[in-house]
Image (tube, rainbow, N blue to C red):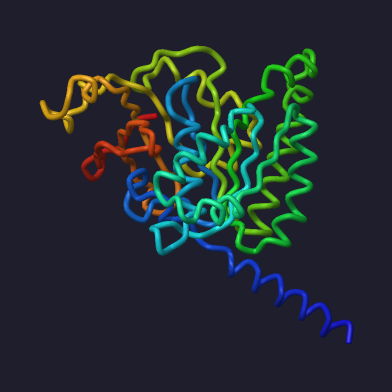
Amino acid sequence: LCCDFHVGVSLQLLARLEARRCLKDIEPQLFADDGGPDRGEVVEVYGPEGTGKTELLYHLLCRCVLPEAAGGLEVDVVFVDTDYSLDVFRLASVLDSRLSAVLRSCLSRLLVVRCSSSSELLLTLHFLETTLSSRPKAALLLIDSISAFYWSDRSEGGASVAKQEEKLSRCSELLGRLLRDYRITIFATCHPIRRTSSGPPSSSSEADRSHLCRAWQRLVTHRLVCSKQEAEHNPANGDQGSGEQRNRQVFTVHCSSWTGTKGSRVSSFRVTDGGVEFVWTHRPPPGLSVVL
């Protein structure tokens, strides 16, 4: 009887895991062909303040909660808001512009948790084990941002690097367990530790690339590096449209992956009333990758 019980529990767990949707097609404009994040993988959305990282999360969130009939993936999303950056009215506006009739249904698939410290983030991640267990359709976890408490943790840790990184390391271990046990996909924004230029990534930003603890770095399988440029530099714009449209701020995303096809892609997007609007996408020639 005991053996049958354990077999039954294992089968139930496997059924819940298989029910969790794969998100490799979450946004084909961002990732190389078949290079999107699979279940159990992490995407770090990296860039200075004001480069469109949170708007990208809004876009991905909407793609997930919208019904399949409207071009969405119809999966539940957990949004961990450590920067208190989530603007529900902005999110509602983006959803409303895409499919106003199902706004309430979409928002019912969203769970928002706010954290103001690393300790609260740790408690939240413990709480998510119960949440994910009871919501088998939850497939995406968004964290904005994973680096929110970097300086406060460093201050509390004193001169010891191990103590400075202790809380984020524990958070990373918990995230690793959620990835393994529930096969979710994670997108997390990350701020540079110092202000950098708003242009394309260069070697000058390499020092900021790996400032988070190794436990977090080991989780990351894809990287989206965000920067901003003026719209008139975008070759897709040409001379069409009004001057105001041509001067609208354009953001660039450099994507690199370490799994699957290990491809690279460069995308450009605007932020409109309806959310992220992709302008153009560039696939590097075979054998040539974007240096990040």
Q: Is residue 177 left or right of residue 195?
A: right
Q: Please tell me whether residue 229 is drawn above or below residue 281 in the rendered image.
A: above
Residue at image point 18% right, 20% down: 243
Residue at image point 63% right, 47% down: 78
Residue at the left extreme? 239
Residue at image point 72% right, 61% down: 133
Q: Is residue 175 left or right of residue 261?
A: right
Q: Nearer the viewer, residue 59 or 21?
A: 59
Q: Quadrant of the C terminus?
A: top left
Residue 174 on image: x %, y % = 73, 45
Q: Quadrant of the N terminus?
A: bottom right
Q: Please tell me whether residue 175 is drawn above or below residue 208 in the rendered image.
A: below
Residue at the bottom extreme? 1
How many badges with numbers are in the image?
A: 0
Q: Please tell me whether residue 265 is drawn above or below residue 134 in the rendered image.
A: above
Residue at the front extreme? 101
Q: Nearer the viewer, residue 29 or 171?
A: 29
Q: Quadrant of residue 70?
A: bottom left
Residue 8 on image: x %, y % = 77, 80
Residue 12 on image: x %, y % = 71, 75
Q: Is residue 100 left or right of residue 281?
A: right
Residue at image point 38% right, 34% down: 273
Residue 97 on image: x %, y % = 40, 44
